[in-house]
Image (spheres, grey):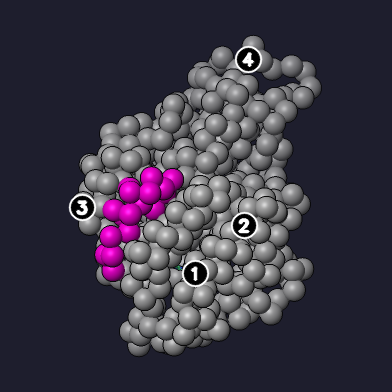
Amino acid sequence: MKTIIRNIDCLVTCRGESVKKGREMMNAGVIQDGYVVIEEDRISAVGEGGGYREYIGPSDRVIDGRGKTVTPGLIDSHTHVVYAGSREFELPLKLAKVGYIDILKAGGGILSSVRETRAASLLELASQSENRLDLMLTHGTTTIESKSGYGLDLQTEMKMLGVNKALNESHPMDIVSTFMGAHAIPMEFKEDREGYIKLIIEEMMPKIKEENLAEFADCFCEEGVFDIEETRRILNAAKAAGFKIKLHADEVVSTGGAELAGELKAVSAEHLVAASTCGMKAMADNNVIAVLLPTTSFYLMLGKFADARKMIDLGVPVALATDCNPGTSPTESLQTVMTYACFGLKMMPEEIINAVTLNAACAAGREREIGSIEAGKKADIVIFDAKNLNYLIYHFGVNAVDTVIKGGLIVVKGGIKC
Ligand code: IZC
Ligand code: ZN
């Protein structure tokens, strides 16, 4: 049985050869009155007008796309979705203008989530995380990148990555795993940074690689967390151990993280609110993807957003993600991120949709399989109750998802998980 979506008012294919940058980001491959043909788990044809008729057989399922916008399944290329507990008790501190890094230094923030995640059983951790995956899926996300980093000891880091692996198998969501032991210095190593860095490099990385629990490694390069020298050392060791690399760079203060991302030829650098022009150029020269997280800037009340316009002008490929985490962006909704990208980052709707599909697929290392609606790619598709792409971003704060198709199967219908 084939599935055919026909008469689509706005079919946003996001087709493209490789990661999009500069003016290419404005090309979202939009087809008016489009159709998509799905066979088994793949897209087999894409076109416009009545061309779908030649594919319809008597037993095929036909979905009407009138009044709808259809996009590739959204890809959330930066999340910390596996964690236990929550941190809403920090809201008064935030409002009293206690800085994010100061809360961390006092043993809160990330370290608070570490305590809860260490204490949770594997089943409890999986169950809390699965609820968030359900929310992501019903909001149109079909693939995520998911980082460890609330363990900061080998056992709990492996527990988190084990949850990624188990949920990747049991849940419709596809999960790309990132090892982030370098998320903070744990309390027990407060007086021995060197000891912790050695533990990451000499024990955690080899074990996690041996068990094949993560594809990427990431490091929180930030004033008060890991400095440039430490980050360079950790990520060079990660590369040598066989990980692809990402880094949290210049989120609050410019420490030269963007420059380092260029130097290390990282797949991506994330946040970049305080990135220097020189760093952006180093990223452009080395094709490092900027994963921007505008809901985090909003939530940290930074008073500014990453300079997406400058990055696009300089030829840095831009992706967008939720940063879904318990402290600085507790949201599962990429649709919300898309609205913030428009009003905060001043990105255009076409740039935004490319940034949560094809460019995000590139940041997650999955561009051959997903990220666009093209014959041969996996049938991960979202049907939105929105008459065009602008409307999807303009009408905000609600879930516009009607149907989600994952690997050819309908997994969300009428906005509800099947
Ligand atoms: O739990 O605070 N920025 N890491 C770096 C985070 C945010 C997650 C958190
Ligand atoms: Zn993050």
Q: Is residue 400 visible?
A: no
Residue mark closest to the camera, 2 vs 3: 2
Residue occupied by mark 3: 277
**C-alpha distance separating marks 4 and 3:** 52 Å
Using the image, determine if residue 245 lies above or below residue 197: above
Q: At 37% from the left edge and 72% from the top edge, which residue is drawn?
A: 300
Q: At 41% from the left edge and 48% from the top edge, which residue is drawn?
A: 266
Query: Neighbour class for label 3 at 10 Å: few (<14), some, many (≥20)?
Result: some
Q: Where does the magenta region start and end? A: 253-269
Nearer-the-camera pick, 78 or 193 = 193
Q: At 62% from the left edge and 32% from the top edge, which residue is drawn?
A: 378
Q: Are marks 2 and 3 in contact (CB under 8 Å)?
A: no
First of labels 3, 1 by sequence position: 1
Q: Amino acid at mark 2?
A: Pro
First of labels 2, 1 by sequence position: 1
Q: Amino acid at mark 3?
A: Thr
**C-alpha distance separating marks 2 and 3:** 36 Å
**C-alpha distance separating marks 2 and 1:** 13 Å
**C-alpha distance separating marks 2 and 4:** 54 Å
Residue occupied by mark 1: 197
Element at badge 2? helix
Query: Neighbour class for label 1 at 10 Å: few (<14), some, many (≥20)?
Result: many
Residue occupied by mark 4: 53
Where does the image place residue 355, in percent across and percent down from the top left? 41, 44
Where does the image place residue 169, in percent across and percent down from the top left? 74, 49
Query: Neighbour class for label 2 at 10 Å: few (<14), some, many (≥20)?
Result: some
